[in-house]
Image (cartoon, rainbow, N blue to C red):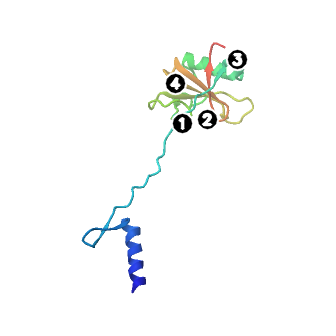
Amino acid sequence: MRTLIAAVTLATIATFGSVTTVASGSAAYAAPAPTTAAVSVVSSPAAVDTCALSSLPPEASDTLDLIHSGGPFPYDQDGTVFSNREGILPSESSGYYHEYTVITPGSPDRGARRLVGGGAKTTPEHVYYTADHYSSFCEVDENS
């Protein structure tokens, strides 16, 4: 019988917290200590490095010229909204970023190189270059 009482007491303590005896001799149960829940913190994107336009493939300059002149662009996808799903670029409202193909000579398709403009389509506030299809970016310094 003592084993049964001990088992019930341990189960009760595990469920409700510790047991204390009050002056009347009856048991009172303290609430279990609050637990700390894991909190996930979403950090802001890391700062994007700057790269000189002159350090990029010459086709990047050609694409930037097309952006500033409003086209025409070689691919239907050029000028479409870039959603920044990767979260690498600074967070902006939907429709802020637009993507453009930087032609890769010899590639049978669009390749991996892109410019992404942020802001107005022909006069973007920020232009980013990716050589690896959005895995990394640098912000283009058009004056160097």
Q: Which mark is residue 87?
A: 1
Q: Where, quadrant-wise, is the C terminus in this rendering?
A: top right
Please say if the residues under marks 4 and 2 sit with CB atoms less than 8 Å apart.
no
Corner quadrant of residue 75: top right
Label 1: state its secondary structure: loop
Under mark 3, the amino acid is: Ser
Residue located beneath label 4 in the image: 118
Please say if the residues under marks 1 and 3 sit with CB atoms less than 8 Å apart.
no
Corner quadrant of residue 70: top right
Q: Is residue 85 above or below residue 130?
A: below
Question: x, y (%) of residue 57?
Answer: 71, 23
Q: CA distance from mark 1 to mark 4?
A: 14 Å
Going from N to C along the chain, the mark reached first, 1 or 4, is: 1
Under mark 1, the amino acid is: Gly
What is the crowding at mark 3: few (fewer than 14 residues within 10 Å), some, or many (at least 20)?
some
Residue located beneath label 2 in the image: 134
Under mark 4, the amino acid is: Gly
Label 2: state its secondary structure: loop
Going from N to C along the chain, the mark reached first, 4 or 2, is: 4
Q: CA distance from mark 2 to mark 1?
A: 10 Å
Q: Is residue 117 left or right of residue 143?
A: left
Q: Which mark is residue 54?
A: 3
Q: Residue at x 56, y 16 (%)?
A: 68
What is the crowding at mark 2: few (fewer than 14 residues within 10 Å), some, or many (at least 20)?
many
Q: Residue at x 47, y 50 (%)?
A: 38
Under mark 2, the amino acid is: Tyr
